[in-house]
Image (spheres, rainbow, N blue to C red):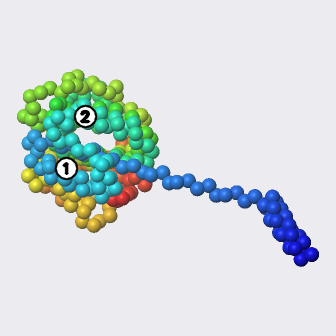
Amino acid sequence: MRRKTIYIIVFIVLLAATLFIIYKPFTPQKAEFAPVETKKFALLVGISTRNPGMSKDIQNMETLVKRAGVESNDITILTRSNDATVGNVLSQLQSYADNLKDGDYLYLYFTGHGGQVYDSNHDEAAIHPGDTLDETILLYDGQLVDDELFNKFAGFSKKVNIVFIADCCDGGTLPALTGEKSINNDFNLAEGLDISKLNAQIIYLGASLDGERAVSKPDGSVFTSALFGVCTQGASLNYYNTLQRVKANVKADQQPVYMELSSNGICEKINACNSADAQFRNQPAFRK
C-alpha cells in the first residue's frame, strides 16, 4: 500500500510537470546580435628624395595610427623605391575599397613632394573657380593625380571613414626632383568631379595651401611633427580643432588646410559643414 502511494505521488508530480511545460505561456526571447567589429587600416607612404625627415614622419604617424586603434598587422608602409609607386598605391587603395565596409576606417598618409599639372578635365574649377591645375603626389615612378585618388575613394562603401593626411608641397618642386614623366602622361584620368559618386566620407588634413611649400627637416617635417605633438600632449580634440593648434604652431612656415568630403559636398568651413557625419567629425583625433 505504501509503495502504491509513492507511485501515485510520483505520477502526479510528473503529470503536473508535463502539463506545465505544455501550457507554459510563450515569452519571446530578446534577440541578441554580436556587435559588428569596426576594422581599421593604415597606409603610410613616404618618399625620401629631398625629404630628410621622411623616416621620422613615418615613425610618428605609425605611432598615431596605433593610438587610433590600428593593429600593427593592419599598417602598410611603402617607403622603398620599388614599393612607393603609383601602381602599388592605387592597388593597395583598391584592396581597401574592395574589403572595407560601412563604419570601417582607413588612415592614408603621405610625406614627400607634391606638384601641379594642367587640369585637363576642369574639375578643379568646380571646387575653386579659376583653378586650372590638378594637384599631384610625386612617387618614385611618377605622379599620382588627385583625380585618381578621387576615383579610388569613390569605390569605397558608403560610410567608410577615411582620414587622409598629406605632408607635401603643392607646386614649384617637380622639375628639380625627377627627370621622368608620369606613367599617366595625359593626366586625363577622371571624367569630372562628381561628388555624388563619393560613398566614403573623408577628413583631409593638408600641410600647405596649393602652390605653397611644406618644410621638411632631418628631425621630421614641420607639419607632421606639429601634428604628432598636438595629438600626444593629452588634449582630446577633434580633427578640426587639432588642425587649428597645428596651424598656430607652424604658421611661420606654412598654412595647413582642413577639408571634409562626402556625397553631401565639399566643405572647408567647419561652422557650416555637414559633409561628414557628426560622429566622425567630432571624434578625438587619433584616439580609439
What residue did someone put label 1 on? 58
Q: Where is residue 86 in the image (x, y as percent from the top left)?
A: 23, 32
Q: Give, as a three-letter code, the residue at label 2.
A: Asn
Q: Residue at x 12, y 34 (%)?
A: 174
Q: Please identify the quarter of the rendering in which residue 76 is found.
A: top left
What residue did someone put label 2 on? 88
Is any part of residue 239 visible from this angle?
no
- Judge by depth and name the residue closer to the eye, 14 or 226: 14
- Judge by depth and name the residue closer to the eye, 190 or 81: 81
Labels 2 and 1 touching (C-beta < 8 A): no
Q: Where is residue 205 in the image (x, y as percent from the top left)?
A: 27, 48
Identify whether 76 is placed above or below 174.
Answer: below
Q: State the SS at label 1.
A: helix
Q: Identify the disc placed on residue 134.
A: none
Q: Residue at x 36, y 59 (%)?
A: 288
Q: State the SS at label 2.
A: helix
The crowding category of the residue bearing disc 2, from other C-alpha atoms within 10 Å (few below 14, some 14 to 19, many at least 20), is few
Earlier residue among tags 2 and 1: 1
Q: Please identify the quarter of the rendering in which residue 181 is found.
A: top left
Q: Residue at x 86, y 67 (%)?
A: 11
Is any part of residue 188 visible from this angle?
yes
The crowding category of the residue bearing disc 1, from other C-alpha atoms within 10 Å (few below 14, some 14 to 19, many at least 20), is many
Q: Where is residue 121 in the image (x, y as percent from the top left)?
A: 29, 26
In-image side of 265 versus 223 (left or right): right
Quadrant of the frame with the N terminus: bottom right
Cα gap from disc 2 to disc 1, whole angstroms? 18 Å
In-image side of 221 versus 75 (left or right): left
Q: Position of residue 194 (x, y in %)?
A: 38, 32
Q: Residue at x 32, y 53 (%)?
A: 71
Q: Give, as a three-letter code, the residue at label 1.
A: Ile
